[in-house]
Amino acid sequence: MSQAIDTAVRRQVESEQTHVSALYELIDKRIAEAQAQLAEVLKAPADSAGEVYEREVAAARLAREVRRLEGADEGLVFGRIDGADGTALRIGRLGLHPDTDPDTDAGTDTGEDDLPLLVDWRAHAARAFYEATPIHPMGLRRRRHLRLEGRAVAAVSDELLDGSEPTADDVVGDGPLTEALRARRTGRMRTAVATLQAEQDDIVRSPHRGVTVVQGGPGTGKTVVALHRAAYVLYAFPRAAERGVLVLGPNARFLDYISQVLPSLGENDVVLATSQELAGADVVPSAVEPLDTARLKGGSAMADGLAALVRARQAPGGDFTVRVGQEWVRLADADVARARDAAVAAGLGHNPGRQVFKELLADAVTDELERSAAETMERIDAEVAQLTGLDLDKAAAADLRRLGLDDAPAGEPADEFDAAAVRANLLDDAHFDRAVESLWPRLAPGQLVRALLRQVLGECADDERSRLLHTSNADGQPWTDADVPLLDEAASLLEGPPERTYGHVVVDEAQELTAMQWRMVVRRCPARSMTLVGDFAQAGPVSTARDWEQALTPHVGARFTLHTLTVSYRTTEEILATTRHLLARIAPGQTPSRSIRRGEAPRTRTAPPPALAATVAEELRAQAAAHPDELLGLICADTRLDELTAVGTETGARLVPASEARGLEFDAVVVVGPEEITAARPGGERDLYVALTRATKRLCTIAIRPV
Ligand SMILES: Nc1ncnc2c1ncn2[C@@H]1O[C@H](COP(=O)(O)OP(=O)(O)OP(=O)(O)O)[C@@H](O)[C@H]1O
């Protein structure tokens, strides 16, 4: 770089630094203010329960605000757009406005009091930062990217969008995307807020509140889009934000990989979970089972089966007989059926519905007792009259009149039947509860699921049954992953809808979900506002849907919008080229993505089984020595894990079973035993495709066979 250019760049960096420092000063001030307010709120006396509650709400709001402001510290400002009319806007993690009090020192001097000092990247005003191109400059002259190191501006880089010639104030060089992609991998996904590409940004800020589906090949930024979409929803859809946003990932390893993205966008309130975690802590799957059992359990027929079992336990027929005191009371079929229908129509779960049923039966039994008491009284009256010629009611009324208590209406018997007391006694009565239990038993989710599995086994052909019997928990074995959505379904049938629901749900690797898992997700999103991202070419063996329509129609009908991302930002063109034939086999209709990365040609090695570990170690050592700062991934069939654990530890490579590689990313990857990965489980070619597309730079495949 010539000295003149160097000086010009330095001048720009210094000029940006002035603004950036002022913005950091302002955010520090805002944090201090929020902390002071929080301390005050916590100190304030609260005498009544109402005041305590109000104080807690205010404290939680302020604590959230402090977290939000603190979360934006890293890379607070990353962009600037200059309009053709000379206006400049700075774009950052969150919006900052000047202090409203003119006497306070905002610490900045933009000279444009009505404009925000920093525009939140999700605000409409920031849109042009992501979407302007030289063909559609959207009124911009220049887009500037800032790279911060801590709070210091390390670099600026400009794109001129209106075709004008660069001036001494413009720094035109390598694009920030190139720089972001060149950065070495760390094992944690980074935010792409500064470099979201137009086709991604378009989806992130889509005004569509229903179901948005994003598909695309490996590395096309589906996860990037999903996470930035979550942040956008929190910003732009306040109603959804109020009810919370959930991001669902396939496993803990993946959640760990993406865990830093949202906090670095200042969003700490998003819940990250696997579907196991969604079901609640009391369901801990600890057993594995064959894939065809898991697939069977994932099918929606299971939901029908559970619902039928519950229905069959809700007063399926017959009368109701209960002993009350010395008497037996019998309700007719029709009375029982009426109570059942009303309890079912209440729309509560089976167990709360039981209480409704019980109360309705108590009403009916009370009526029956009242009727029979009246009948008995009448019979006694009649018998007395016949024997003595006395009308007891009239005689009693005449006695009352003689005593001067003649308010009592003549001719009506005194009402001795206290219906309310009888009903209350019934509801407390153990005999009565036992009789209700025999018609409408209380049920636990585990009990219901085991009953279903026993029934399913009963319906299987003999050979299938013997295969399933050993592994299915029908006979009381520990739960498996595929049982979790069944238990969740059972819980919702028994107890009603889940307590915790969300305003928006993001599902990553959504192709993995079984029909039962979809039901579990949809149950937690009553508004059906969801962002679903995935790639059916990467589907694992348990999911049975082969496209979005199959997966989603049962849950949301045809009401989803589909977007396709086409450019891979991870996998190099060379690696993509070697996987094309595989892709054509596993997803014949899919258009291959193109990549903006170029890299080395993938290499293949061969090792005989006894020398495998040594060959893998040698390959990893050579790569680590040549590229010491890079993140190395070692992917093998699940059955090879034990053999390769020591090699991974010794070389610093991250060892990942092929079944858990979805969504992950490394600088270089060594794939061990492609044939073995393919053969390991049904759909193994898709596992291999996932394994081969994890590297950003280098891929080496080691085949296991005699040399
Ligand atoms: N606009 C962008 N700016 C910078 N990096 C990006 C951008 N889009 C994607 N990337 C990077 O490309 C890589 C792949 O992105 P991502 O993991 O979101 O892809 P994916 O489609 O979810 O992949 P997979 O199908 O394998 O799960 C990541 O390192 C991500 O940070």
Image (cartoon, rainbow, N blue to C red):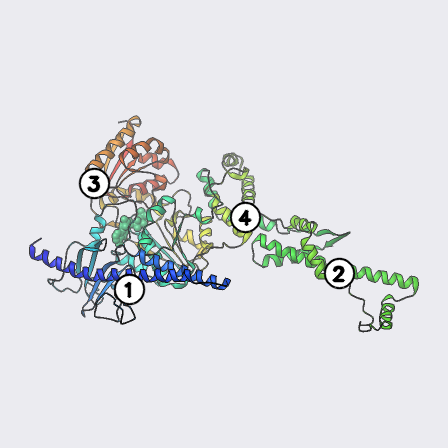
Q: Is mark 3 within 8 Å of ligand 1?
A: no
Question: Real-space Cα distance between discs 1 and 3?
Answer: 47 Å
Q: Which of marks 2 and 1 is nearer the N terminus?
A: 1
Q: In this view, does 697 lie above or below 332?
A: above
Q: Is mark 3 on a helix, strand or loop?
A: loop
The residue indicated by pointer 3 is 601
Q: Seen in the image, is 460 located left or right of residue 336?
A: left
**Residue 85 visible within the image:** yes
Q: Residue 370 carries which label?
A: 2
What's the amino acid at mark 3?
A: Ala
Question: Real-space Cα distance between discs 2 and 1?
Answer: 73 Å
Residue 537 at x, y percent in the picture:
34, 46
Q: Nearer the viewer, mark 1 or mark 4?
A: 1
Residue 345 at x, y percent in the picture:
59, 59
Q: Which of 30 and 179 is in front in this view?
A: 30
Question: Real-space Cα distance between discs 1 and 4?
Answer: 53 Å
Disc 3 crowd, CA 10 A, few/some/many (<14, 14-19, 20+): some
Q: Earlier in the sequence, mark 1 or mark 3?
A: 1
The residue indicated by pointer 1 is 96
Q: Seen in the image, is 153 located left or right of residue 661?
A: left
- Where, quadrant-wise, is the C terminus in this rendering? top left
What's the amino acid at mark 4?
A: Leu
Q: Nearer the viewer, residue 37 or 472?
A: 37
Residue 581 at x, y percent in the picture:
28, 42
Q: In this view, does 414 lie above or below 214?
A: below
Q: What element carries label 2?
A: helix
Q: Earlier in the sequence, mark 3 or mark 4?
A: 4
Question: Real-space Cα distance between discs 4 and 2?
Answer: 39 Å
Q: Earlier in the sequence, mark 4 or mark 2?
A: 4
What's the amino acid at mark 1?
A: Leu
The residue indicated by pointer 4 is 306
Residue 583 at x, y percent in the picture:
31, 44
